[in-house]
Every structure is written in C-alpha cells, then in structure tokens.
Amino acid sequence: MVGALYHENDSRRDAGFSLFYAGINVGALLGGYACIAIANSYSWNLAFGLAAIVMTISLVTFIFTQKSLGPIGLSPFRSKGIEGKKWMEYATYLGSLAIIPIIMVMVSKTEYTDYFMYTIGPATLIYLFYEMGKFSVAERKKLLGALVFIIFSILFWAFFEQSGGSLAIFSANNLHDTVAGVKLDPNGVNNAANSLFVIIFAPLLGLLWVWLSKRNKEPNTVIKFGLGFLFLALAFYTFYATRFFAGADGMTSLEIFTLAYFIITFGELCLSPIGLSIMTKLSPQPLQGVMMGMWFLASAYGQYVAGILGAGMVSPNENASLTEKLISYTDGYQQLAIYALVTGIVLIAISPFVRKLMGEVK
C-alpha cells in the first residue's frame, strides 16, 4: 500500500517508507515499555492482551480513514471491477482465522515451528521460480535481485534480533538502572530504546535521502544495505565494549548499552525501510504481495536464527557468576560484530553484480 502511493520512478519512495517505519515504531515504543510495566505490576496475560486491543483499534481506524487513500488498499478484484471472485476475499479472511490454532500449537511446541521453518522457505522459493517463468528476462533479473536483498536481510535480522533473547537476559542481569542520572528499567530500555531512536531519526534520514537524490548523490540500495551491516557491526562492538565499563560485581553501564542501540538504529534504517521500498520497485505488480511476504518471511527466518545464536552465548554453567555471564555474552556480541562487518564488506563488493540485475531501478 505504501509503495502504491508513489509513481514508479518517484525518488521519495525510500523516504516514504522511512516515515512509514517511524509510524510502526510508535507502537513498538509504547508497547515495548508498557508491556514490561504492566507485566511487572499485573500479569503477562494482560500485557499481551493489550496488544490485541490496540491492533483492533488500528483496524477500526484504518476502516474509517480508508476513503482518504482512494483505490489504494482496496481488494484487487473490487478495484478492477471483478465481482465473480469475491468468494476469494472471504476465503482469505476465513483462512486467516483458521490458521490461529495452528500458530498457537507451533508456539507451544517448538518442534512444530522447526518443521514449518524447514518447509515454508523451500516451498515459497519453488512457487516463486514457477511464477518467474511468466515474466520477461528483465523482470526475472529484477526478481533475482530482490532475492539477493531477501537473503542478506535474513543475515541482518539473525544478528540484529537479539533484543528478545540474549540482550533481554543481559539487560536483566548485568546492567545498572540509570541513564544520565535517570532511573530506568534496563529491560524497558532494551525493549523501547531502538523504537524511540527510529521515531526520532527515520524522518530525518528520509529527508536526507530526498536531499541527496535531488543532487544525484543518493547511494543506491545495495550500498545502503552494506551501510546497514557496517552500523550493525559497530553497534555489536559497542555491546561488547560494555565489559570494559563493568565493576567487580559484573554489573555494567546502561548508558553504553543505550549508545549501542542508538548506533544499531541507523543500521536498521539503512536496511529495513529501504528493503520494503525495493521490494515494490523490483517486483512486477502481480507479484508484489508475494515478494513483500517473502521479505517478512526472511525476517522470521532471521529471528529464528537469532534465537539459535543467542542460545549459543549462554554460559553452560547455570550457577555462573554475573562476571562470567558478562564475559560469555560480550564474547558473543564481539563475534556478531565480526560477522556483520564481513557481510557488509561482501555486499558492497558484489554491488556491481546486483545493480546489473536491478536494471534501471536504483
């Protein structure tokens, strides 16, 4: 829908997705900190139930404001005047409801999640390659270019998405509770700092892309992705550096931890909204929904791998001291910094090849 707001060669598209991304993070900021506060004061059931209530409010808001978007967001059948396939709309709604029990089973029994992750990715690729045969050579090259971005995004999220795992445990166990003299819940900071920085800086970075574009100096999407990994590497090196600010008790600085989230935000803004934008640029109209779905599937795979990487940072000794836990986690963050740095360099190195696949798309 956001992509449909812009013409095909509109240079403001990346900036528009950056602003859209800031809007997403308003909910992440409020929910991230409120969830911790409500759970600590009342219960986790209420905290997670609040998410459902707010999503319902969002849906109602969209329904009442949809008219301002014109035909954007309408059913493709309705916008094209096709009434005979209206049953497919209802099938989509019913299918969405029917899948909820399956998701609940997958959450409660993680082995089923493993089976799903092993099959959904290959099945999606097979379907995509089947659909690619219906398009021209130039369009197929663009789709292959989109796949390159999707594959690298899996690696990005695998490194990035430690906030719900290792960083949450690290912040609960090893961080002081003050930032610039203000007392804060370390896990609240872990949940909300990134979103706060996204809200502040996403519009500014979007304006920077527009400003550079007008002067023909805007970096192409591949370079932006590469910069995302370089910022990610610097951020995880900063997480690693918290060990140098720790006391004898294994407790370290919440300020340095927050600085790392400040840095990681710029990595996210160079990749995530830009990735959303490039999916709409490289995908033929009939496949835009599929490619956007694959982009978010890549995010799911990244979070899946992130859990595996985070588990590897845990000290095998359950009775380890806080200092031992600090060393174990920060060693892991140093490794992630190295992986992110190498990946960013590789991506920038192959940028000429990827740009050829992209054709006229920048």
Image: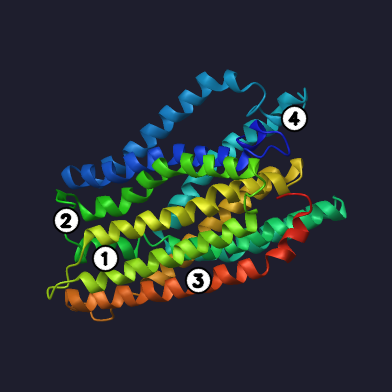
Q: Quadrant of residue 212?
A: top right
Mark toward the viewer: 4 or 2? 2
Disc 2 marks which amino acid?
Answer: Asp
Q: Which residue is mark 2?
A: 177
At x 75% / y 30%, what residue is drawn?
85
At x 59% / y 63%, what residue is drawn?
152
- Tag 3: Cα neighbours inside 10 Å, few (<14), some, or many (≥20)? many
Is 36 placed left or right of 79 in the picture?
left
Q: Percent from the top left, x then y, of residue 225?
A: 58, 58
Q: Which residue is mark 3?
A: 341
Mark toward the viewer: 1 or 4? 1
Q: Which mark is residue 85?
A: 4
Is residue 237 at least partly visible in the picture? yes
Q: Percent from the top left, x then y, of residue 124?
A: 67, 57
Marked residue nearer the N-terminal end (4 or 3)? 4
At x 56% / y 22%, what residue is drawn?
66
Q: Which residue is mark 1?
A: 170
Q: Which mark is residue 60?
A: none
Quadrant of the image for the N terminus?
Answer: top right
Is residue 112 at least partly visible in the picture? no
Q: Report the front residue among 31 and 156.
A: 156
Disc 3 marks which amino acid?
Answer: Leu
Q: CA distance from mark 4 to mark 3?
A: 49 Å
Q: CA distance from mark 3 to mark 2?
A: 30 Å
Marked residue nearer the N-terminal end (3 or 1)? 1
Mark toward the viewer: 2 or 1? 2
Mark toward the viewer: 4 or 3? 3
Q: Percent from the top left, x then y, of residue 306?
A: 44, 65
- Tag 2: Cα neighbours inside 10 Å, few (<14), some, or many (≥20)? many
Mark toward the viewer: 3 or 1? 3
Circle 4: element type = loop
